[in-house]
Image (cartoon, rainbow, N blue to C red):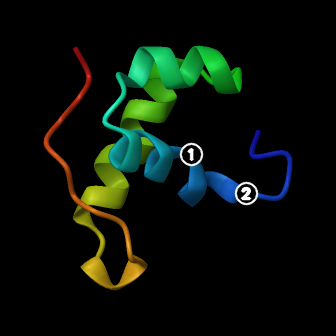
């Protein structure tokens, strides 16, 4: 499902860093928005050492 070089960490990071809605990013990447929402939630629970800003939820 991951397919490609970015890996699943890059996809939720795109949501967090861009401030865009999960549904919009999911559509652009060809990933179901609920799957992407789960990845974003998982990334938010990881330590900040990932270098990703933990922006507020942009699901709606």
Q: Quadrant of the C terminus?
A: top left
- The quarter of the rendered structure image containing the N terminus is top right
Most extreme residue toward the right, as rendered?
A: 4
Q: Which residue lies furthest to the bottom in this view?
A: 49
Up the image or down, 58 lies above or below 14; here it is above
Q: Name the residue under label 2.
A: 6
> In the rendered image, which quarter is residue 59 located in?
top left
Q: Position of residue 28 (x, y in %)?
A: 64, 19
Residue visible at 46% across and 46% down? 12
Coordinates of residue 31 in the picture (x, y in percent): 64, 24
Q: Residue furthest front?
A: 18
Quadrant in the rendering for residue 7: bottom right
* The one of 33 and 28 positioned closer to us in this rendering: 28
Q: Nearer the viewer, residue 5 or 19?
A: 19
- Quick check: 48 left or right of 13? left
Question: In the orientation shown, which residue stands out farthest toward the left?
Answer: 56
Residue drawn at x 61%, y 53% as measured from the top left: 8
Q: How crowded is mark 1: few (under 14 residues within 10 Å), some or many (20 or more)?
A: some
Rendered residue at 30%/71% (across/down):
46
Name the residue rendered at 38%, 50% in the picture. Answer: 17
Sequence order check: which comes first, mark 1 or mark 2?
2
Asked which quadrant contains residue 10, the reply is: bottom right
Where in the figure is residue 14, as x and y percent of width and height?
49, 45
Q: CB under 8 Å between callouts 1 and 2? A: yes
Label 2: which secondary element: loop
Residues under labels 1 and 2: Cα distance?
A: 7 Å
**Viewed as shown, does residue 35 lie left or right of 43?**
right
For label 1, the residue is: 11
- Secondary structure at numbered mark 1: helix
Indicate left or right for 13 with 6 as reference: left
């Amino acid at each position: 499902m991951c397919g490609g070089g970015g890996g699943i960490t890059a996809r939720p990071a795109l949501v967090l860093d861009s401030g865009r809605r999960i549904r919009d990013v999911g559509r652009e990447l060809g990933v179901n928005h609920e799957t992407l929402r789960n990845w974003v939630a998982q990334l938010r629970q990881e330590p900040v050492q990932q270098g990703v800003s933990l922006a507020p939820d942009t699901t709606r």
